[in-house]
Image (cartoon, grey):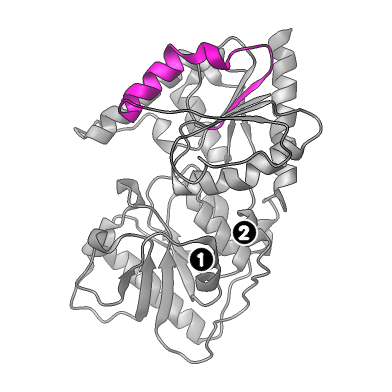
Amino acid sequence: MKLHLTNVTGAGASQLLLSLLPAIEQNINLKTKKIYLPNKGLLQNYKSINGLSEVYVYNRFLPNIVSRLIECMFLSKKFDDQSPLLVLGDIPLRVKCPQTVFVQQSHLIKPNIFRWKLSYFKYMIARLIFRLNSSRVSSFIVQSNIMKERLETSYPSIKGKVHVVSQPVPNWLLNSGIKRVKRSINDKSNLKLIYPSSDYSHKNHKLLSKINPNGDYPISDLILTLDKNSNPAPHFPWVKCVGFLSSEELKKIYSIVDGLIFLSIEESYGFPLVEAMFVGIPIICPDLPYARNLCGDKAIYFDSDSPESLMLAIKKLKKMLDSGWWPSWDSQMQSIPSNWKITAAQIIEIILSSSKINNN
């Protein structure tokens, strides 16, 4: 089997693969022969854990979307032989070998509204490549039933090929031993909250800029993993932009915060929500299908377009915590695999089954 992840450079997706790749390599049912890595990001220096896989770095010299177009449509032969190919970067390749594509990118879903933005055209090209190469794919893997439904609706020709495989939290958190059952402080002080997210428009940081500056809000700190020059609400002293956080830094913060805020309006899964549930902290998130699917009725929801609704949700959390409430996520976590070996085994079973169908 070959693993293709030349385009996986985002922090969230990279963290996922740093946990998934070793589990795939350790699986005895399908040998990993070659791994193609990106030339930047957390994965560029990945080393095979058993030394049996050949590792290559795919260098790009053109703008990313142009390079991806050429790679996926015209230079895919280098990845093509009789062994199965697992593409971990969302976009199918134009190959003849059995191919499985792991789709994490929600922007591959056909949007309802046309927007005159550069990012819109970038994703429009990605959706075009996806559509043109989808017939070359034996199976697709997504992280939730909602993503499966949306992907099949956007690309009807792939219906019946899409499989759902959930993932646990990254290994650094899985092995941390953190399990919260109460606030880290016992008084009724203002809330310390975190929103771990990159600076993408769909992450909806701009909602913070619309909050009434004259309001009285029960927040001591809202930690954002943004650079200081990207602060969406610098007029609020409690908005703290701390930049990228390492796994060790995140573990320390998860051990003391009073809850996680999630503002995103578009997700294929929502990894920070799973992390918060695993740790055991309260969650405030948009009342959107992806969040409802993961969090059920345990989260505190708000209207993703309304700063007033967000602040009411924060005040609600403060009141509930002051009364002694603390969430239990046990029922929601039952559907999440307990380790990455389980996830890897499910993915490899899909590859083997679809490869047999494809070869027949």
In this rendered view, identify the residue nearer to me: 160 or 18: 18
Residue 213 to residue 29: above or below = below
Q: Secondary structure at mark 1?
A: helix
- Is 335 on the left or on the right of 260, as rendered? right
Q: Residue furthest top?
A: 360
- Residue at point 50%, 40% (across, down): 44
The residue that label 1 is drawn on is 250
- Is 226 on the left or on the right of 31, as rendered? left
The numbered mark, 1 or 2, whose residue comes first in the sequence reads 2
The answer to which quarter of the image holds residue 192 is: bottom left
- Is 28 on the left or on the right of 225, as rendered? right
The answer to which quarter of the image holds residue 205 is: bottom left
Please say if the residues under marks 1 and 2 sit with CB atoms less than 8 Å apart.
yes
- Is 334 on the left or on the right of 238, as rendered? right
Q: Which residues are magenta?
A: 61-88
The quadrant in which the C terminus is found is top right
- Residue at point 62%, 74% (across, down): 180
Q: 10 Å neighbourhood of mark 2: few (<14), some, or many (≥20)?
A: some
User: Is 322 one of the magenta-colored residues?
Assistant: no
Whole-percent x and y of residue 283? 49, 66
The residue that label 2 is drawn on is 172
Which amino acid is tagged 1? Answer: Leu
Which amino acid is tagged 2? Answer: Trp
Whole-percent x and y of residue 139? 62, 23
User: Is 67 one of the magenta-colored residues?
Assistant: yes
